[in-house]
Amino acid sequence: MKFLCIQCDEVMSFSDRDLPGDGTITALFSCGVCGREMAMLTNPMETQLITSLGVEIGGRTVPEQPFQQTRTRLDAPREDVFVDAVVSSSEDNGDANTASVSEHEFAKIRVTWSPEATDRLGGVPRFVRGMVKRIYTDYAQEKQIEIITPDVMDQIRSELGLEGM
Amino acid sequence: MSELTSGSGTAPEERSATRARAVRGYADLSGEVESRIVEQIGEQHARLATRLSEVGAIIVIASGKGGVGKSAVTANLAVTLANCGARVGAVDADLNGPSLGRMLGFLGSQLEDRPDGVVPATGVAGVRGISTDLLIEEGVPLKWKGPSHDQFVWQGVTEAVTLREFISDVVWGPLDYLLIDIPPGTDKIGRFLNLVSEVGPAHLQPHQVLLVTIPSEAAAAVVARSATQLREAGVPCVGVVGNMAGYARPGRDDLLPLFTGPSAGEIARAAGLELWAEIPFDSVWGAKTDRGEPVGAEGDSATARVIAQLAEQVEHGPGGREEKK
């Protein structure tokens, strides 16, 4: 979409954007020759149609995050689903964050949580639950423990000195 | 959409004169388009192309009809291929009725965030997977933020982009096979074909499509429609997989009938397709799959033997490891 200042025969430039929070967008365009300004107002349906494409009106100011739309458009997502990458010692000296999934990760054992352990994890405050789960899971993987039970949780807490978790 | 203008007022006669002038069209205007929407979509396609360049073969498991056991076939085929040493990823494209997370045993897993993508969950036999049942709590329906009225207008686009993110934004690593479990509905098969056809300069196609069916008249009609759609799209390798092809009793090779409709072989012939497998119904095998412990081709049951043959067929088919030798 482009806007043309008919008086000046000049393509108008995007100058500002406002998101009032009601699903609408106000995008301002101005003519570089005469200074005339124009506001493009989209209704919630038009805004939704465009953003459903996973694009940002007016161009991206920051790079697109992986799963950008899924994260931002999903209603009531699981709170602890995404966790930050853990830098292992073998990756520590390199560009760990951009390291691709390596072959050895196919050999990782699958760790499952018993219902009792899951219940107990539910007692951990929500804002740290994901991190706590990750710590237990990683440790179990390292020790080749396939199922996390309350006893295994006690063992890991003791070995890692996580008595408060 | 509406526009408001500010600045110097224009008299009506002046506006009339302006309208009489020739106004340049979109293609006549040079310079950058500042919304960059086309470029942004191009970047999304480029990411998808990069990710798929590491995949040996895209295997689509579809049907058009619901309730025929596509996900169970997907899970057991994935595990069988992985047990044969293949690197396997599985995408649950059934966003509204996900089941691969449960069947492949990665329900409740967390997804590790990296700047270059999200690390997939690891399931049975090391199969990597992604599914909406990782993203929402159990028992909660998939819902998107947006205007509540006329959701059908934008929901399809949202789901297509989510499916694209499930492939392009996941750090799959090098894979021998990426299995795509397509939800019911022939339109869903078309949606996936459209998605991958945008990748790269060539018109990318899945390497193999498995059309899963059961011995029933209703399923036969849907398979015929799906076959026509795939033929029109130019997909070269399509095989029919008959599921629930009789009831397998433990320790017995003969099958008891489950349905009275046409066999998978007859359905395949009518649709002008090859029959790749007829999988007997085995309650133990099915229960294990539902529990997240799919055994694939393990054991000596008739069902396991057929799954082994199906995996062999995939390995020798287009893009398969045996075909590349």
Image: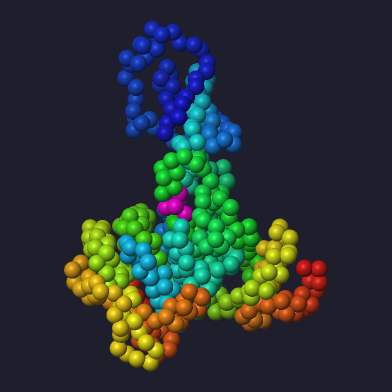
What span is in magenta?
B157-162
Q: Do we see residue B79 in this rendering?
A: no
- Residue found 71% across the figure and 79% down from its top: A152
Q: Quadrant of the N terminus of chain B?
A: top left
Question: x, y percentage for residue B80?
Answer: 42, 80
On the picture, is A130 further left or further right than B86? right
Relative vertical location of residue B22 with respect to residue A25 in this rendering, above or below:
above
Instruction: State the quadrant of the C terminus of chain B.
Output: bottom left
Q: Is residue A7 left or right of residue A159?
A: left
The residue under the point 38% across, 7% down is B13
In the rendered image, the vertical position of residue B90 relative to residue A45, given as above or below: below
The image quadrant of residue B16 is top left
Asked whether B272 or B52 is in front, the reply is B272
Residue at x 37% of width, y 66% of height = B67
Name the foreground residue: A118 vs B246.
B246
Q: Position of residue A1 (x, y in %)?
A: 42, 33
Residue in view at x 41 percent, y 8 percent: B12
Looking at the magenta stretch, what is its main secondary structure? helix
Indicate the position of residue A139 as horizontal and vertical percent values.
Answer: 68, 76
In the image, residue B297 sits, relative to residue A2, either above or below, namely below
| Percent of width and height locating residue A39 | 51, 26
